[in-house]
Image (cartoon, rainbow, N blue to C red):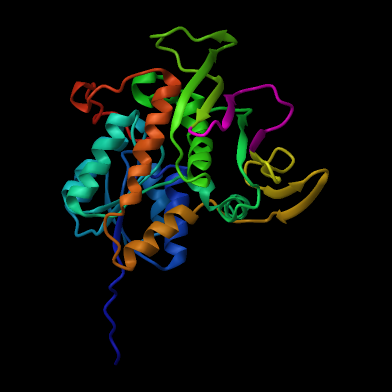
Amino acid sequence: MNMTHDTRPRLGFLGLGWIGRHRMEAIANSGHARIAALADPWPEAVENARALAPDAAIGQTLDDLLRYDLDGIVIATPSAQHAEQSIAALDRGLAVFCQKPLGRDAAEAAAVVAAARRADRLLGVDLSYRHTAAMQAIRDRLRQGALGDVFAVDLTFHNAYGPDKPWFYDRRLSGGGCVMDLGVHLVDLMLWSLGNPRIEETTANLFANGRPLLPGSPEVEDFAAVTLRLAGGTAVRLTCSWKLQAGCDAVIGAEFFGTQGGAAMRNVNGSFYDFTAEAFTGTARELLVGPPDDWGGRAAVDWARRLASGARFDPAAEELVTLSKALDAIYGRTAAPMAEREQTAAEPVL
């Protein structure tokens, strides 16, 4: 009888809400890794996930997962726990794939990246919109120089509903409001597509419940209008919101305008999931990509594939710190060291 030893990476999953289960299912279906252990303090969440991985070991906390023989951990817990949990796993020699944001500010993100470098372990963050076929097509055109010199970028993400968990609205736990939740994706797409240009100037207008958000307010913003000036003069406009009365479920777009043409990724009919990519020359337009496109789990699958191939620390992880610094500039803050943070390890995983 032929017996083959399964050498795929053994993964633990921490946080088993909808997004945690979705990423687990995507990785399981890819075949790149084994689902070895599950952890969440809510029994119902564990049971729902266990239906997808009946042989996985069960726990409630990160400490439970660290008792098992694992190669990596996928983290889908509240934002306040991301940095601390990622560092703990990396320090134990495990690769990490974490939900965004990696940290509530650049100090936390930098500490995680330093831990990954120190451990020489692969670090990934679920910046999933990079993996849409629409954005891939636009980035290809930008890299080919098809748009000429890009002088303007418009970024939009309006979510008509907003988060349903209370911690999103607590600045200590979330790090910020709609910019941290939605704008992070758009700023990342801009930096990633344009080759990580330096941001030289930032102007931000943040609102909560229709009123300007005052400096030091404990509230988080539910609407943001931001202007960034990049090295070389490119103007970037970002608007994002929760619960905006926009007449549809969502308005999502990333538009790039250059001296020789334009290109835009836009959602279709208010969808959170369906996107087109178009190229513009004068008044003419060309459809580059249209739906359907099952992109939601691709970032996690790509990380699992790289882990299975033996990948270790990737210096491109430094881009995560650059992204966090851009968000800090929007919020007008200097990040405090992690040691000065309130202890949040006891917060429930939601």
Taking the magenta stretch, the answer to whether it contains residue 123 is: no
Q: Is residue 340 left or right of residue 349?
A: left
- For this view, does 203 lie left or right of residue 89? right
Residue 15, relative to residue 162: is it above or below? below
Indicate whether residue 242 is drawn in magenta.
Answer: yes
Left or right: where 173 falls relative to 263: left
Q: Which residue appears at 47% of the width and 58% of the height?
A: 26
Left or right: 128 with respect to 325? right
Q: How many marks?
A: 0
Task: Tell me the quarter of the image containing the C terminus.
Answer: top left
Can residue 15 be spotted in the picture?
no
- Where does the magenta region start and end? 231-254
* Quarter of image, res 153: top right
**Relative vertical location of residue 272 with respect to residue 139 in this rendering, above or below:** above
Image quadrant where residue 93 sits? bottom left
Q: Is residue 212 visible?
A: yes
